[in-house]
Amino acid sequence: MKSDTSGSTRFFAILLVLFVAAVTLISGCHIFGGGGDDYSGPAAVSTITGRVVKPVANIATSRESERAELSAADISGSLGIAGAEVWLENLAADPRFKTVTDASGTYLFTDVPPGEHRVIVKYFDPATGKTMKNRSTGLKVADTQAMVEAPDLIGEPALNVVTGQLRDAEGNFLPAGTVLNLWGEPFTVGKDGTFTSPPLPESASEAAILVQLPGGNNISSFTAPFVSDVVPVFVELKIGAADDGNHAPTVYVSASVSGKAVYKVNPGTVVTLLAVGSDANSDDQAALVPTWFATNGTLADGASAFEKRWTAPDYFTVATISVEVKDLKNATGKAQLPILVGIDNPSQVDTSRPTVALTADAENVTDSAAFNLTITFNEPVKGFEEDDIAVTNAVLSDFTTVAASKIFRAKATPQAAGEVKISVAENIATDLSNNKNSASNILTLTNSITPAKSSEKAITAFSFPALSVTGTINNTNKTISVTVPFGTNVTALVASFTVSPKAAVTVGDVVQVSANTANDFSSAEIYTVTAEDGSTSDYTVTVTITQPTQITALNLSSLITAPVKGAVPVTAAIDQTQYTSGAISWFEADGMTAVTGNFAAAKVYVAKLTLAARSGYTFAGVTENSFVYTGATSVANAANSGNITITFGATDATVINIAAVPGVTAPVTGATPVTTITETAQYTGTVSWSPTHAIFAADTVYTATVTLTPKA
């Protein structure tokens, strides 16, 4: 916290009034009316007359230091004040020298003895509610009878008093009722020796107060300062001499700024304090030692022990400067000088602690949004800074003073989710009367953090399940490469893919649904992945069709069952890595007549089949008649073709074991020759005769030739 020692422009102007706490003790025997010559009866007497007037300029409403000096024109032609009390200061105890003014404001004293006299005037001004007083300059009355005309007297507001406590030389309080006299006006000591004087006008900065000592006619006097009715000087005096003849010292204290007397100043003003000590005992005078004390502000050494530089505190208050002087016998005299700091009256001293309230322009915040904090004190304060604000879960910035050191503002930025608490502790700032603040309310807000939207936007898996192929993803270059089998129709492929959580995928304007949306991959497709936070990443998907491999599995020997006499033709399709086929077709040797039934013996058969290349394989590049079949008489295929014709050698013949040829009869004359045999299970046959006769002739030798034909 910082302390502000500059004067406030709010404070009232400094009144130039001499503060003097002074005591002058005079011992002796006087008639109590004192102050002039003793009067015991008429000698050469004179008359004193004059007027009490009201000036054209109204002076009753202000102090002398707060108004312009009166000119002769201000007094000339003034109306008289009727009913004003008037007396001669040094003869006030004699009723003959107390009177009141007539309707014209005129007073008259007769039988005034020779000597110097002062006229005192006192009246109440109903317009202002103030008692008005004044005292004339000394009027010399000669030894010869004369009319002395006093100048017109103008009453001034009687405001300033002096207070104190009186003791006798032994330190006992003067008894209550002890009579004191000021300007010829009596007043008395109260309890414990205390007194308050009648008021004097401000023009009377000091005056002698007479003390009628108890138990006789001894009269002492002391001079005291009259500086204020608001903060009157307080004097502590011992009246008279002690039994050893020692008189207690006295001390005057004055306060000035730039050579002008003051009794109120602005905070932080540097004031020159001057103490003047005196002692009736000459031996003690040079040995007086002052001790200084200030209830507020700071004292610094001046040119001597009797001078100090006092810096007024930087807040509003009543400061009291005390000086005590001590002689060689430890007798003391004291003076107390009250000084108003920044105020006009002690009642203005503020003893209440400043309060402080914290408010914000938001009840709660979201996502650490900054809010404005207002710190409002109920009165101006000093020493309040940003560091005096206690903050939990936030940082402050842009701290500024908004209004007259009362309202401050800062920006608060929450740091994490949860409660933000802000407060101002007690006793960290002071008001202009140096009261420390009470603690503020605890301002509590909740900072709610919206879960951060994901910025993840990656494709983590990509495949074409229908083709059983999986893409290769490069997340650095944002590319996906997929190779599909030869012959794949890529114009309407459906991809399955996996992306970052909460991300979405589009191709152009079309939202992509994994395993559902078809796309044409004839050229590269751009898959745009949009993260939850709206950021995007483009993946280029390239589909490459595999170039087929030339079929090399040309040996069909193990794939087709060769014809065997009596066997059922095997027509089962071929299913190999490189190709498949439909059913195998079997034909007679002419390649056109389909085989029915089982294979016959000793017959040539032809197998025809069409091979289909599997995905990734092709017959392109297969040369003419490049397929082989071990044991076949020929294998024919056109170049680049899977249409194959295989010609097998004749099946094995059946061994005929029926030796007797049935149905052949010997020639009989006249019989018709038999031309066929009786068919057997193994063969059929024909019979030819030589010579050839339609009917066997007699006596002819015939030769029969039997030709057997094996059955299939």
Image: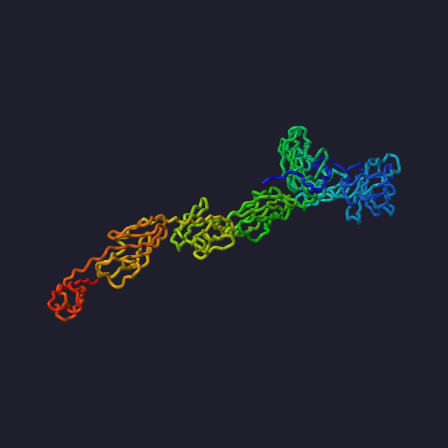
Q: Does residue 392 appear in this view?
A: no
Q: Nearer the viewer, residue 486 or 93?
A: 486
Residue at the bottom extreme of this rendering: 670
Task: Name the quarter where the N terminus is drawn.
Answer: top right
Tell me: 548 left or right of 692.
right
Point out the image quarter for the C terminus: bottom left
Quadrant of the rendered structure where residue 400 is?
top right
Image coords of residue 473 (percent x, y): 42, 47
644 lies left or right of 92: left
Q: Residue at x 52, y 47 (%)?
A: 415
* Residue nearest the observer in this picture, 121 or 353: 353
Indicate the position of residue 619 as horizontal and vertical percent values.
35, 50
Image color mode: rainbow
The count of marks equals: 0
The image position of residue 630, as x and y in percent, is 25, 51
Taking 426 as reference, is 253 above or below it? above
Question: Quadrant of residue 516 in the image?
Answer: bottom left
Q: Could you tell me if residue 308 is visible in this image?
A: yes
Of residues 303 and 265, the one nearer the viewer is 265
From the viewer's perspective, tell me whether residue 116 is left or right of residue 542: right
Relative horizontal placement of residue 241, taking residue 202 as reference (left or right): left
Residue 669 coordinates in the image, percent (x, y): 12, 70
